[in-house]
Image (spheres, grey):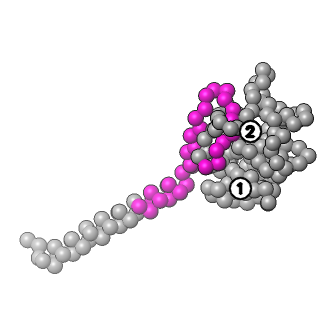
Amino acid sequence: MESKTDERRTFIKKTIAALFTIGSGSLLYSVIHYFSPKQIHIQSKRGYAGIFDAETNRAKRKNNAFLPVKTSDGHFEIDLSKLPDGESAFMSLSDIPVIAVNRGDNYRIFNATCTHLGCLVKWDPSGKRFICPCHGGIYNEDGEVVAGPPPAAIKEYKTEVSGTFVKIMVA
């Protein structure tokens, strides 16, 4: 039969082991949650193109000044005349989130997905750069990585400008 001291030692050992297990599990959960990619669900019908709402990251259909139209050759065309110089607009080309930037003399269209973990990048007009809000990735105005964890540049789509209309080559 164990003595009272042995019973206390056993109880203390089991309590410390349980607390260590709970603490380790909490720490592991926090680390996994931090590094897991953010899930962005974009509900759209096949072929639909629209602008993203900055708050919800969901495509808006009403009051949309930037509505890309799918052309017969599979590309998209958009009138960006209402996009102010230096500003940007989020859009969806089918299920591809893109960001259009008005550079004054030309319009540039980039894939809006960060190459690190898939978050949506945002255009910083004052710094003329793209910033990923999830883990601090920074891309220059050409989409090349400047700082942070992204492993590659964001993709720029080829465009053909005809007046204020921009044809986006997605294929």
Q: Which residue is mark 1?
A: 131
Residue 27 falls inside the magenta stretch: yes
Residue 148 position by quadrant: bottom right
Q: Determine whether 163 is above or below 71 in the image.
A: below
Give me the C-alpha separation between circle 1 and circle 2. 24 Å
**Three-letter code for the amino acid on which mark 2 is drawn:** Ala
Q: Does residue 150 appear in this view?
A: no
Magenta segment: 26-55
**Residue 58, x across and y down, in percent:** 60, 41
Q: Residue at x 57, y 49 (%)?
A: 37
Question: Which element is circle 1 on?
Answer: strand
**Three-letter code for the amino acid on which mark 1 is drawn:** Ile
Residue 12 position by quadrant: bottom left
Q: Is residue 41 left or right of residue 170?
A: left
* Quarter in which the N terminus is drawn: bottom left
Q: Residue at x 84, y 40 (%)?
A: 81
**Residue 41, x across and y down, in percent:** 56, 40
Q: Determine whether 8 is above or below 167 in the image.
A: below
Residue 100 falls inside the magenta stretch: no
Count neighbours of disc 1 (C-alpha within 10 A) and say few if under 14, some if 14 to 19, many if 20 or more.
Answer: many
Residue 66 position by quadrant: top right
Q: Residue at x 44, y 62 (%)?
A: 27
Q: Nearer the viewer, residue 77 or 98?
A: 77
Q: Which residue is mark 2?
A: 65
Count of numbered badges drawn on the protein: 2
Question: Which element is circle 2 on?
Answer: loop
Q: Earlier in the sequence, mark 1 or mark 2?
A: 2
Q: Residue at x 21, y 71 (%)?
A: 11
Res. 98 mark: none
